[in-house]
Amino acid sequence: AMTASSKLVTLIIGDALHNFIDGITIATAFAKSNSMGFGTSFAVLLHELPHELGDFAVYYKLSGSYMRALAYNLFSALFCYAGLFLGFGILNIPGLKDWLLMFAAASFMYITVTHILPEIEIVQTGSTESFELRLFLVIAGLLLGWFSMMLLAIFETEVSQLFA
């Protein structure tokens, strides 16, 4: 069994790596186009808000202190900037943009499959929510995300003009 401190270290490392990949993803998207960069930043923001709130709750539960939980969350969030700066720094290497975009897309798919889909448990866990309701909510969330990205792709020119 893992101790609270080993769980805390594991969460910090995982969260820092996750944020680092977010930073590389944003840098790569901006290197392709401003509209792709803003669209990706928006998608990461929507994804990170509930994720960081959840991390804060776990940090608090494991540390017992709001200030320590905030510090752990801030520390791991700084890795997004490290990924962003590294991403901008290495994107001048010829042909790397497409590979980094592929890596970013694969990372987001991995996160979806390993973090979201396990929430849909086939066996009832005593929760008042039914399996069907959880399945519906996850599918609705995925469809909303895809629809939002499709709208950003369709109106890419108009969106990029807003930020020009």
Image: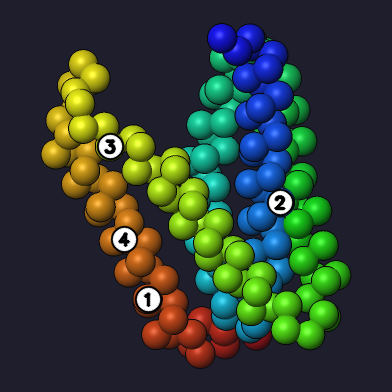
- Mark-to-mark CA distance, 4 and 1: 10 Å
From the viewer's perspective, is the residue at label 3 or at label 1 nearer?
3
Q: Earlier in the sequence, mark 4 or mark 3?
A: 3
Q: Which residue is mark 4?
A: 144
Q: Are marks 3 and 2 in contact (CB under 8 Å)?
A: no
From the viewer's perspective, is the residue at label 2 or at label 4 nearer?
2
Residue 143 location (% of width, % of height): 29, 61
- Mark-to-mark CA distance, 3 and 1: 25 Å
- Mark-to-mark CA distance, 3 and 2: 27 Å
Q: Is residue 69 visible?
A: no
Q: Are marks 1 and 2 in contact (CB under 8 Å)?
A: no
- Mark-to-mark CA distance, 2 and 4: 25 Å
Q: Which residue is mark 2?
A: 20
Q: Earlier in the sequence, mark 4 or mark 1?
A: 4
Q: Residue at x 44, y 41 (%)?
A: 115
Q: Residues within 10 Å of mark 2 (few under 14, many from 20)?
A: many
Vertical position of residue 51 compared to residue 64: above or below: below
Q: Identify the element where label 4 is drawn.
A: helix
Q: Are marks 2 and 4 in contact (CB under 8 Å)?
A: no
Q: Are marks 4 and 1 in contact (CB under 8 Å)?
A: no
Quadrant of image for the N terminus: top right
Q: Which residue is mark 1?
A: 150
Q: Is residue 123 left or right of residue 103?
A: left
Residue 40 location (% of width, % of height): 56, 67
Vertical position of residue 86 compared to residue 3: above or below: below
The residue type indicated by label 4 comes to: Leu
Q: Which residue is mark 3?
A: 120
